[in-house]
Amino acid sequence: MSLDVELLNAFTISCVEQLTNIEQHVLSLEQDKSASSIDAIFRAAHSIKADAATMGFVKIADLAHQAEDVLHLVRSGRIDLSRILIDALLQVFDCLRRMISRPLEAEDKDASESLMLLERFLATEQDAESRESTNVACMENSAKSVRPAGGPEPGLQLVQLTIPASKLDILVDQLGELAAFQARLTALSRRHRDLDALAEELERNLSCLRDQIMALRLVALKPMFAKIRRLVRDMAAQTGKQVSLTLTGEDTELDKTAMERLHAPLTHVLRNAVDHGIETPDERNALGKPRTGQIRVEARQVGADVEIVIRDDGRGVNREKLHQQALARGIPLDHIQGQDDSLLDLAFMPGLSTATCVSAYSGRGVGMDAAREEVRALRGDISLSSTPGEGTTVFIRLPLALAILDSLQIMIGDDSFFLQIANIEECLEIRRESVTLRLGRGTLCVREGMLPLVCLRTFFNMDAPAPGLAPVLVVRAGDMRLGLIVDRIVGNRQIVLKQISRILGRLDGILGSAVTEDGSLALVLDVPDIIRLCLR
């Protein structure tokens, strides 16, 4: 089959969007069997059938048509919308999703199992004449949807365009180059005053353009929340637990890259909540709890960050078990008391788990460690609190935008570096000879408190600095503070972050790179990672 690539992509994107909406409505039927949800599923299935038939994908069209027939019987009240039927519909639409993901191979795939599921329900309705008239009506509607009969066709008005993410990434990269050019022009205008007005006008226009481009990268969390709903539902069924999931803040927006990569950490957290946290109905009944466990996921924007909170009312984290496992592995815990909240940080260590057995979903002590690494890679933070017998709360905080950073440019030797301003508490100044450093590390008394110090020249294996005055940047990540000794502070800059090539692998203390005023590349420091490396 020879098809236009762009037409094929448009078909796939349209069908995937329809299937996403279908899944949300099918899952909502478990709480509220509203006619509007059934109608929405029917219309979406009809659209998929019509589009597939137009493209010549017979098997996809046939399966969608069978689903449409079953939904028609539900709409007309001739078969009941049971839990078994909801399960069957989800399986059928999952099969459609797999076929649509590779439509050119769909004709070679076996969809008989899904067709048999639907035929089982169709067999309960013997009114063949009614079904035949329904099929004729659907075919007529399909023909009408392709070309409206009568009257002139309305003018084409596009209210929404689908832009490939790769093109948007290129646009952001070009924005970074333009920002570097603007910074160079601003620096040049300091020496040539007649360029001031031009530099200011360019800066204003570029700022507006930057805001608009970054807004294009923001996407609502709604699609990810739909996947969460299905995940929790399936896990509850497979583990024999009763779980009610509440989602709020689905319209909260996040950078597209962050949302794509956030799915894995959220999956790990929710698997732990269902598998470890929520008790079985009988256990909850014996504890005096409702038989149905509660999981609540809330998303909201807090300043320039997005905060996602996952709460469950399960058994909570067993701190004593964490303590014993840590001791068994030789992890020093002299500074931690038996019930100290800092013990909860051990839940993020690889290999540590409070599970008594390994299940298909969790128990190996890998999930929360993987979640933390992924969140940190997104310049975010993850933490948890827990009350035994009452439940656990996981907090995830991520920056709203990943590509543009408000930064401070510094010099170490002849090299420029950038640090995020959000991580900087204050700037101090010291005489190098007044501070004793051992292997580039020491302490500084700041307002009757001791601040750990690190010389960045030593951290990056550069030559020893000359004596004299040196700036100290006091930086923070969570509850940890550190003083970074640098050679010179250049000033504030707004930069477009460029990722380091994967060929180089992960570089400790490095977040990425950015273009400086003179057009050269400078490394962007990962302040939280540097603090962890220096204070661990």
Image: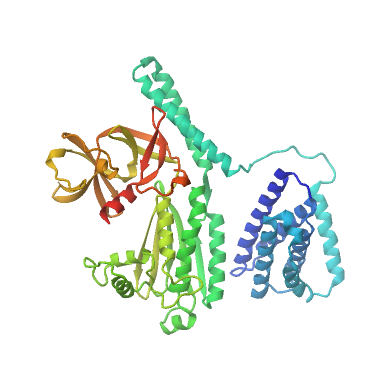
Measured as percent of width and height from the top left, residue 463 is found at 24, 38
Q: Is residue 199 above or below residue 49?
A: above
Residue 20, picture quadrant: bottom right
Q: Is residue 37 above or below residue 446?
A: below
Residue 415, picture quadrant: top left
Give 401 or 178, whichever is nearer the viewer.
178
Q: Is residue 223 left or right of residue 436?
A: right
Q: Is residue 4 left or right of residue 387?
A: right
Q: Is residue 364 left or right of residue 46?
A: left
**For the image shown, how many numbered marks are present on the structure?**
0
Please name the residue shown 48% across and 37% down the image. Answer: 211
Q: Is residue 272 left or right of residue 142?
A: left
Measured as percent of width and height from the top left, residue 31 is found at 58, 69
Please name the residue shown 44% across and 23% down the image. Answer: 201
Residue 197, picture quadrant: top left
- Quadrant containing the C terminus is bottom left
Give 425 or 181, whichever is nearer the viewer.
181
Measured as percent of width and height from the top left, residue 266 is found at 47, 61
